[in-house]
Image (cartoon, grey):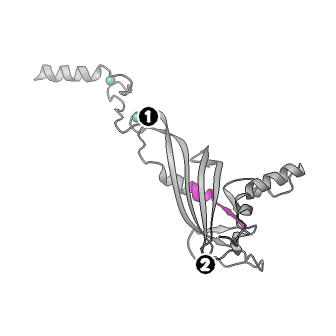
């Protein structure tokens, strides 16, 4: 869209970092210091419905109790009520296999689709009533759209309930507790022997 200066949006986070660097000591509030999960939508709030902007995300985020590098892209589409945020993000988490109890790395793909509502009128600065919807996501009074909470919620939903280190994980031996993926124990042989003997 030609009427919007795209460079100002795409370069927002870089711009903030540059300002911080130039001034040495940061005078900006903590929440705007280059966190790629926080998008300043002040200019985009003035854009007409349908205008879309994309932002790169690369941020350490706490998911399920530990910090993870989350990377990907978020697209903001101006709606008549606020923004539709569509994000495709990926990270890598450590899970415990529900069969063999070993820790393994699991790639997590997180697809977010949420509407965000402004709390302040960008032109008048007056408070805007937000929709009467439970847990709706809002843009704060500094025009920062924060993806962190949506990301956490979607990430938790994306984590498998019964994680498996691999589809055909052999699990633990009920006899000796050995990991059957690593070595077959003698329990199964004994069972077979006994079965053979009994038959
Ligand atoms: Zn396993
Ligand atoms: Zn065994």
In the rendered image, the vertical position of residue 148 relative to residue 178, given as above or below: below
Q: Is mark 1 within 8 Å of ligand 1?
A: yes
Pick out the residue farthest to the front.
2
Magenta region? 142-152
**Helix, strand or loop status at disc 2:** loop
Label 2 neighbour load within 10 Å: few <14, some 14-19, many 20+: few
Horizontal relation, residue 114 to residue 128: left or right? left
Q: Quadrant of the N terminus?
A: bottom right
Q: Earlier in the sequence, mark 2 or mark 1?
A: 2
- Give the residue at x 59% y 73%: 50
**Helix, strand or loop status at disc 1:** loop
Q: Which residue is mark 1?
A: 101
- Give the residue at x 55% y 65%: 114
Query: Which residue is at the front of the view, 23 or 25?
Result: 23
| Residue 76 x/y as whole percent | 61, 65
Query: Which residue is at the front of the view, 162 or 57?
Result: 57
């Amino acid at each position: 869209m030609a009427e919007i200066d795209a460079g100002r949006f795409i370069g927002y986070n870089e711009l903030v970092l540059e300002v911080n660097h130039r001034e040495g000591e940061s005078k900006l509030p903590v929440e705007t210091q280059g966190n790629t999960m926080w998008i300043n939508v002040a200019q985009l709030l003035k854009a007409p419905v349908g205008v879309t902007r994309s932002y790169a995300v690369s941020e350490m985020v706490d998911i399920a109790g530990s910090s993870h590098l989350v990377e990907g892209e978020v697209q903001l589409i101006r709606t008549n009520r606020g923004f539709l945020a569509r994000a495709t993000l990926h990270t890598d988490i450590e899970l415990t296999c529900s069969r063999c109890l070993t820790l393994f790395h699991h790639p997590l793909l997180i697809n977010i689709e949420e509407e965000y509502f402004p709390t302040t009128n960008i032109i008048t600065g007056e408070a805007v009533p937000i929709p009467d919807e439970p847990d709706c996501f809002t843009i704060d009074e500094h025009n920062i759209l924060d993806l962190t909470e949506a990301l956490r919620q979607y990430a938790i939903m994306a984590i498998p309930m019964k994680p498996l280190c691999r589809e055909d994980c052999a699990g633990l031996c009920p006899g000796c507790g050995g990991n059957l993926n690593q070595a077959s124990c003698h329990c199964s042989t004994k069972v077979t022997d006994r079965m053979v003997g009994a038959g």
